[in-house]
Image (cartoon, rainbow, N blue to C red):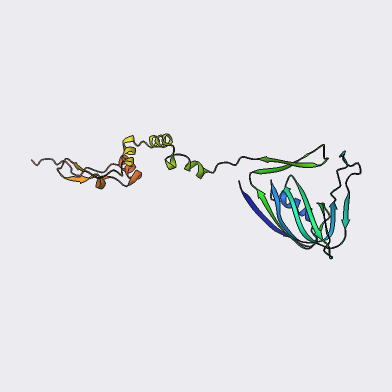
Amino acid sequence: AGMEIHAFRLTPGQDLRKSLVSYAKGAKLEAGCVLTCVGSLQKVSLRLANADSSTSTHNPKGNETVSLDERFEIVSLTGTVSRHGCHLHISLADYQGNVVGGHLLDGCVVFTTAELVLGECVGHVFSREMDEETGFDELVVTTKLAPVPATKRIRNGYGNGSNNSSFDSEIRKTGVSQAVVGGVANAGASPRKTKIENGDSESEEERKPPGFFGWLGRAIAPPPPGKYATTPSV
């Protein structure tokens, strides 16, 4: 698992929340979070901290929102982003530096720009389910198992010698005898002189083939003998 980065810019007139939701669905974002956002808004719609859902037992008055038709600098934007749903909070500063914040709603319109960087938590899924106690769709985090890459499977198999039985099985499939495999294993032995039929001698270091594929080549197509038998002349 890790994190992938998504970065993009919104232009004047675009709705901040709607654009984030649209991007999450288009990019099939399963589990994202806002890393940073900078820009400005010309119209704002927020749900305040004391507001509960109209279906909640905590506050029978229902949602309490505020709409402001003036320009604000985006001080911060934070929250979770997924194609299954988003939960975002924003802080804004007016022309005097006064800060207002709350739950981001549709209707927050970009003034000059909104530069967004999102992080995607690979291997997780952010979904939402109705919570009867709060009356809102609340976050549910699940993990998904990633498939093991083929290269990793090879490294964990006979490719690195960690699984000798798999290696032996593969050798048997090729038709190469265990003697050949033993020759490969003993290829690093110290040289010693060996008597051969023609009376000459040579070291095993000179006689050994270059590694496994040399042994395989000799097993499939052995070299001709050094001397051929001659027919005596009549």
Q: Position of residue 20 (x, y in %)?
A: 75, 53
The quarter in which the C terminus is drawn is top left
- Residue 135, above or below 100: above
In terms of depth relative to the viewer, which is nearer, 44 or 148? 44
Residue with the most extreme right position:
61
Q: Is residue 231 left or right of residue 167?
A: left
In terms of depth relative to the viewer, which is nearer, 195 or 26? 195
Q: Position of residue 232 (x, y in %)?
A: 10, 40
Q: Position of residue 210 (x, y in %)?
A: 32, 47
- Residue 3, above or below 58: below
Task: Please report the residue visible at 71 percent of the width from the left and 57 percent of the height from the top.
Answer: 36
Q: Is residue 114 left or right of residue 44?
A: left
Task: Please report the residue visible at 89 percent of the width from the left and 49 percent of the height from the top.
Answer: 64
Q: Is residue 15 visible?
A: no
Q: Is residue 162 visible?
A: yes
Q: Quadrant of residue 163?
A: top left
Q: How many marks?
A: 0
Q: Quadrant of residue 54?
A: top right
Q: Position of residue 188 (x, y in %)?
A: 31, 44
In terms of depth relative to the viewer, which is nearer, 124 or 196? 124
Task: Please report the residue visible at 39 percent of the width from the left and 35 percent of the height from the top.
Answer: 168
